[in-house]
Amino acid sequence: MIATQFRIQFAKQVNQEQRLDIYDQDGQLLPGALGHIHIPFRWQNALSGKLGVEYKVSDFASLRVGGNVARSSTTDEGAQSFLPPGGPAYFASLGAGLHWDNATLDLATAVAWGKHNISRSKLIVDIPPDDPIRNDSYSNVCQEGDLLKVGCSGEYKVLTIWASAQLTYGK
């Protein structure tokens, strides 16, 4: 069996920022700009292509392999440490199924990775810090000790590995 999928994720149309309210120890909202942090996401629409193949070795066993290549919805301007890195992302998986009369054992493993570099020349600067989101820009918040870091230069990367086993029993 062969399966393919092409997908467009309309991330640009969803929330473009998150607002955090900051309270003091007495539960009072801090005054003015100190009481709110706006975190801009700056999403872009994401594209992905997937391919999977399953081969039935016998009535007892089957093998699977799959892959995915995608463009991240994270932009250079919206890059943050808690978001997936921008640029291309990759995913590969392997699996096997073992089938008995009343039970099936499914084993799988997968790895996903991505890496993206942002150079200092791509950053938008000189927006006052009391107006962090204005005219589709953001303030330059990339200094040591800054609470909010958005679109800062550097290398963003992720590596994730999964493994799973599932036993299904039924008459």
Image (spheres, rainbow, N blue to C red):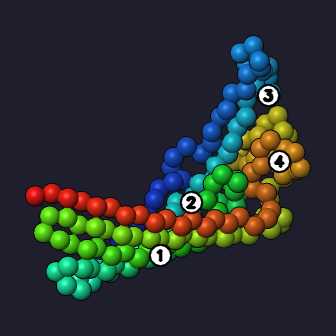
| Kind of residue at badge 1 | Ala
> Relative to 56, is 52 on the left or the right?
right
Q: Which of marks 2 and 1 is nearer the N terminus?
A: 2
Label 4 Cα crowd, 10 Å radius (few <14 / some 14-19 / many 20+): some
Label 2 Cα crowd, 10 Å radius (few <14 / some 14-19 / many 20+): many
> Relative to 107, is 122 on the left or the right?
right
> Which residue lies under the disc numbered 1?
92
> Which residue lies under the disc numbered 4?
141
* 49 lies above or below 167: below
Give the CA distance from mark 1 to mark 4.
35 Å
At numbered mark 3, what does the secondary structure look like: helix, strand or loop? helix
At numbered mark 4, what does the secondary structure look like: helix, strand or loop? loop
> Relative to 93, is 38 on the left or the right?
right
Give the CA distance from mark 2 to mark 1.
19 Å
Residue 105 percent across, percent down from the top left: 28, 67
Label 3 Cα crowd, 10 Å radius (few <14 / some 14-19 / many 20+): some
Residue 1 appears in the rendering: no
| Kind of residue at badge 4 | Val
